Amino acid sequence: MSTRVTTPVTTTVPISAVDPAQPQPLSALHTGNRLYRRRQRLNRLMLTLSMLALLSGLFWLAWILWTLIAKGAASLSWQLFTQPTIS
């Protein structure tokens, strides 16, 4: 037994057929929507906070690497590589 799949028929209405005097429903993504504006503000806030966290983490990483290189470079010498370590 086979099943028959039907697709819905859609019709398009030309723009000229839309009556401009009739109010059109607002989309949920319309900039006048309070919920959309609230989510947009919250999104900007969270993006700002995440960028600050990123910059903070990169700062401390750079600080640690700089300290490691500055203090470690002074300890490098040929004796470190050619002499046996003290046990």
Image (spheres, rainbow, N blue to C red):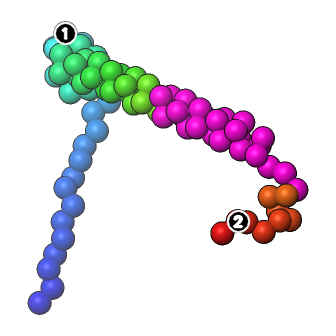
Please identify the residue farthest to the left as the structure is shown: 1
- Seen in the picture, residue 75 relative to 53 is either above or below; the reply is below
- Which residues, given as a range, are shown in magenta? 55-78
Whether residue 16 is visible, yes or no, is no
Q: CA distance from mark 1 to mark 2?
A: 92 Å
Label 1 neighbour load within 10 Å: few <14, some 14-19, many 20+: few
- Seen in the picture, residue 30 relative to 74 is either above or below; the reply is above
Is residue 76 rendered to the left or right of residue 3? right
Whether residue 52 is visible, yes or no, is yes
Is residue 60 rendered to the left or right of residue 79? left
- Seen in the picture, residue 60 relative to 22 is either above or below; the reply is below
- Identify the element where label 1 is drawn: loop
- Seen in the picture, residue 68 relative to 35 is either above or below; the reply is below
Observer-nearest of 10 and 86: 86
Please state, as top left, top right, bottom left or bottom right, where the C terminus lies in the image. Answer: bottom right
| Image position, residue 75 (x, y; %) | 76, 46
- Identify the element where label 2 is drawn: loop
| Image position, residue 6 (x, y; %) | 18, 66
Q: Which mark is residue 86?
A: 2
Observer-nearest of 33 and 25: 33
Residue at coordinates 33% horizontally, 27% vertically from top-left? 46
| Image position, residue 4 (x, y; %) | 16, 75
Asked whether residue 66 is drawn in magenta, I would say yes
| Image position, residue 36 (x, y; %) | 23, 22
Q: Which residue is mark 1?
A: 21
